[in-house]
Amino acid sequence: MVDRANRPSALNAPSAAAPGPQVEITGSGAASKVTATLPSGESVQVLLYGATVISWKSNGGKTENLWVSEKAALDGTKAVRGGVPVVFPVFGPPPKSGHATSALPQHGFARNSRWEYLGKSTSEDALDSTSVKLDFGLYTTGLSEDAHKAWPLDFGLVYSVTLAKDSLQTVVNVRNEGEQSFEFQFLLHTYFRINDITKTQVNGLLGVQYIDKVLNASTHDQKDASVAITGEVDRVYKSIPQDTTTIVEGGSPRFDVVRDNLQDTVVWNPWIEKAASMGDFSPDDGYKNMICVEVGAVNGWQKLEKGEVFEGGQTIKSLL
């Protein structure tokens, strides 16, 4: 056989398409949940009740990043103790009278309403699907009779949960769909799983003014570079100039919490007595393995006129 210098190369068979993120819906009614898993193993689970993220695993699916109480209700009977509950349209106890939210329960209705799953979208490069976005909706027509009676305003919420290999993004879009303006507060009540609260600090709040709910809602300035947890902590840090707050464990950064169009952050740990007093907090010493760093707009009120939209959220980066 004569060897030709310029003979054509062999044709390569087309490679199979790279596997994409897998999304499945399990359960029924308020106990339904949506689970998304990346080809590399990372995953997120979102309960339709409250659109509450109840699991986020990074590091190839080996590391759970969120703390959920062993006694958390996952059947739609009450708000979930743990994960990432969505607080809207009021944070904490509502004003006693004279405000549109005054008839609502603590933390509003979003965390104990059944949301609608709106579908998924993916971001792909040439080789792999690197992220998946899950969208959830809550509208005036989806509220319970009691919630609608307490807050008879026309609104729309779209909550987007985006899972990437080393991060989780959660963003809420609020729209005024009625004729009447309304005010609201919003918070993502994230429970982070940690190994030892006594070796955990929160950085990125130096010089920020905060309201200390443990000390009769008195106002203070953060004078230390790190917030250490040595007892019950319930603080609202307001108008934070920098976007990133870092959770440090054992001297090493564990999570970066990057705020997007949100100015405030709540730092919370119930410690011994408060944890023991909450019926759905388990185990009693679970406070040792969790810390809440909660981004939001809770210092004052956000106002939307007819047709206006507000959007804010966070990107959490796992630093393992």
Image (cartoon, rainbow, N blue to C red):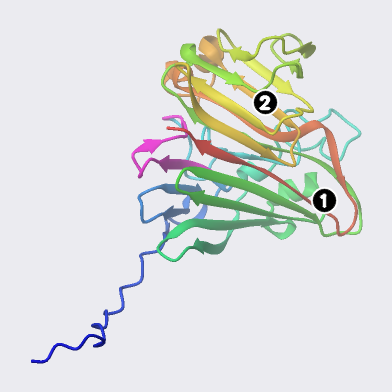
Camera-side residue of 3 and 271: 3
Q: Quadrant of residue 196?
A: top left
Q: Say few, some or many: other residues with alpha carbon within 10 Å of mark 2 (under 14 / 14 to 19 / 20 or more).
A: many
Question: In screen coordinates, is 134 left or right of 176?
Answer: left
| Residue identified by numbered label 2 | 266
Residue 204 is marked as none
Which residue type does callout 1 highlight? Pro
Q: Does the segment drawn in magenta span residue 55?
A: yes
Residue 8 as seen in the image, left or right of residue 77: left
The residue beneath circle 1 is: 152
Callout 1–callout 2 Cβ contact below 8 Å: no
Callout 2: SS: strand
Looking at the image, residue 305 sits to the left or right of residue 20; the answer is right
Q: Please tell me which residue is depicted at 88% across the width and 36% down the height of the picture.
A: 99
SS label for mark 1: loop
Residue shown at 43%/53% (left/top)?
A: 35
Q: Is residue 174 left or right of residue 75?
A: right
Q: Identity of the amino acid at label 2? A: Val
Query: Which residues are the magenta region?
Result: 53-70
Identify the residue at horizontal 65%, vertical 48% (top origin): 171
